[in-house]
Image (tube, rainbow, N blue to C red):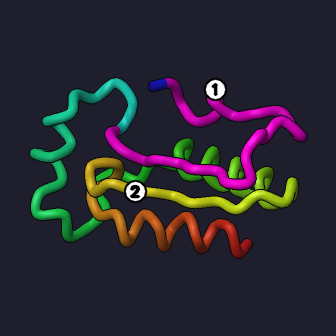
Amino acid sequence: MPPLSRAAHSPGQFHSPLLRLRLLTPLKMSYEAPKKRAEPYTKIVEELPEMRRDTVELVRQALSEGCHAYMLVNNRSEGNAPLTVQGVSDMLRN
């Protein structure tokens, strides 16, 4: 999959009332590598700032166009999905 920034839309280009984002395995990493790296999934093992910035940008863009945003986060992305969600949520508040 391409980075979120490459999958981003231009303003006014959302064709659905719902933006769905899936934050899964880091770029250029096999499916199994993040599992081994992150077990037992109790902490962030590597924060992915570009992924977080792109996510915040897409969510803000969608909301500005009247869309709702839904984000699914897998533990494999940064090591602990709830902490990733909290980090993105904090960024959205600023």
Q: Which residues are magenta?
A: 2-25
Q: Amino acid at mark 2?
A: Val
Q: Amino acid at mark 1?
A: Arg
| Looking at the image, residue 42 lies above or below residue 60 | below
At 51% from the left edge and 24% from the top edge, which residue is drawn?
2
Q: Say which residue appears at 76% left-offset and 33% top-offset.
A: 9
- Distance between the Cα atoms at labels 2 and 1? 19 Å
Residue drawn 31% across the image and 62% down it: 44
- Give the residue displayed 41% in from the left and 53% down from the top: 47
> Within 10 Å of the Cα at label 2, are there few (<14), some (14-19), or many (20+) other Cα atoms?
some
Identify the image quadrant of residue 91.
bottom right
Q: Give residue 73's mark.
A: 2
Secondary element at tag 2: strand
Say above or below: 36 vs 13: below
Q: Position of residue 60 (x, y in %)?
A: 76, 57
Rate crowding at label 1 as few (under 14), some (14 to 19) or many (20 or more) other CA atoms within 10 Å. few
Magenta segment includes 15: yes
Q: How many marks?
A: 2
On the image, the x and y values in percent for residue 65 come to 86, 54
Q: Is residue 32 magenta?
A: no
Please report whichever mark, 2 or 1, sits nearer to the chain's N-terminal start.
1
Q: Position of residue 54 (x, y in %)?
A: 63, 44
Mark 1: which secondary structure? helix
Is 7 situated left or right of 34 in this image?
right
Q: Viewed as shown, does residue 43 lie left or right of 59?
A: left
Above or below residue 58? Residue 33 is above
Q: Relative to residue 12, is residue 88 drawn left or right? A: left
Q: Position of residue 81 (x, y in %)?
A: 34, 63
Quadrant where the C terminus lies? Answer: bottom right
Q: Which residue is under mark 1?
A: 6
Which label number is shown at residue 21? none
Q: Is residue 26 left or right of residue 31?
A: right
